[in-house]
Image (tube, rainbow, N blue to C red):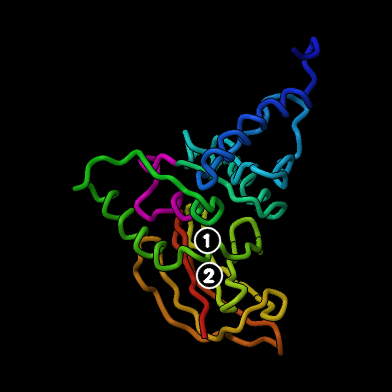
Amino acid sequence: GHEIPMLRQTHAENIFKVIQNVKKEFPHILIEAHDRGVKPRHPLYYQHNLSHSFDENWGFECMWNPMQDLLSGKATQLFEYNLAYSIPLYLHINENSDNENMLQFWWYASLARHLGIGGLSNRQSAKYKALKDAMTLYKKNKPFFTRGKFYGISYNIHLHVDEIDKSGVITAYNLSSRVQKIDVHINLVKYGLDVNTVNIYNGINQKISTIKLNKKSENISQIEVEIPPLSPIIAILQK
């Protein structure tokens, strides 16, 4: 039995018991937990550090209209989540709404450590090929996105750092209809980076340029790059 009306705590504990029972029986399975469905909401880290707990949090339903969520600003909640929590997010996105530059794909690939993709069935389509090209670049750098340390330089400039290798990846996004020139200043010491070269790609794995970091001071380096309208760039930072 339970209280009438049921308390939020009781509701959350009963859901958590189901999670724990599954984990005890199948310890290697990944479990993504939604919030507990009652208001006011529990903190998103609630119960995560307990034994046999869930592995990932839900991606705030940014799955049905991911491009609309990105351009409207709704998807910035994923950015803010990553500033606050290191618990991975799981999200499955509909790639049918993406553009030819793979803007949508790279935004969510940067912010959801466990990313699922659907929505494209015609393997002969230009968008399917663009997604394959984007995935080739993503898979080469996947450890940065799935296990790297996340830093939000700004809403539209993200940094992922391999803390052991001291290398990193920057993803930057132009959400406007005009070309944008970005000027990124990076404190190498602050972010634990030991790099001097940047390989810059567009969203479909076409290399744009290779540049040397421009040192502004002993610890501060600079990257300048133009981003076409509604496009991402992916900058690989290495020695």
Is disc 1 surrounded by few (<14), some (14 to 19) or many (20+) residues within 10 Å? many
Quadrant the N terminus occupies: top right
- Furthest-front residue in view? 25
| Foreground: disc 1 or disc 2 | 1
Helix, strand, or loop for circle 2?
strand
Q: Which residue is drawn at 67% across and 48% down?
A: 81
Q: Position of residue 167 (x, y in %)?
A: 56, 77
The segment highlighted magenta reads 93-106
Q: Residue at x 57, y 83 (%)?
A: 195
Mark 1–mark 2 CB contact (< 8 Å): yes
Residue at far top of view: 4
Q: What residue type is labelled 2?
A: Val
Q: Residue 169 carries which label?
A: 2
Q: Residue tagged by mark 1?
A: 145
Q: How far apart are marks 1 and 2 (CA)?
A: 8 Å
Whether residue 118 sits left or right of residue 182 in the image: it is left
Q: What residue sits 63% from the left and 36% below the top?
A: 20
x and y, in percent, of residue 154 in the image: 65, 60
Q: Does the magenta stretch include residue 226?
A: no
Going by the image, does 4 lie left or right of 135?
right
Which residue occupies 77% across, 15% down? 6
Label 2, residues with CA under 10 Å away: few <14, some 14-19, many ≥20? many
Q: Which amino acid does label 1 sit on?
A: Phe
Judge from the rendering whether residue 93 lies leftward or rightward of residue 59; answer left or right: left
- The circle on residue 61 is none
| 83 to the left or right of 214 | right
**Helix, strand or loop under label 1:** helix
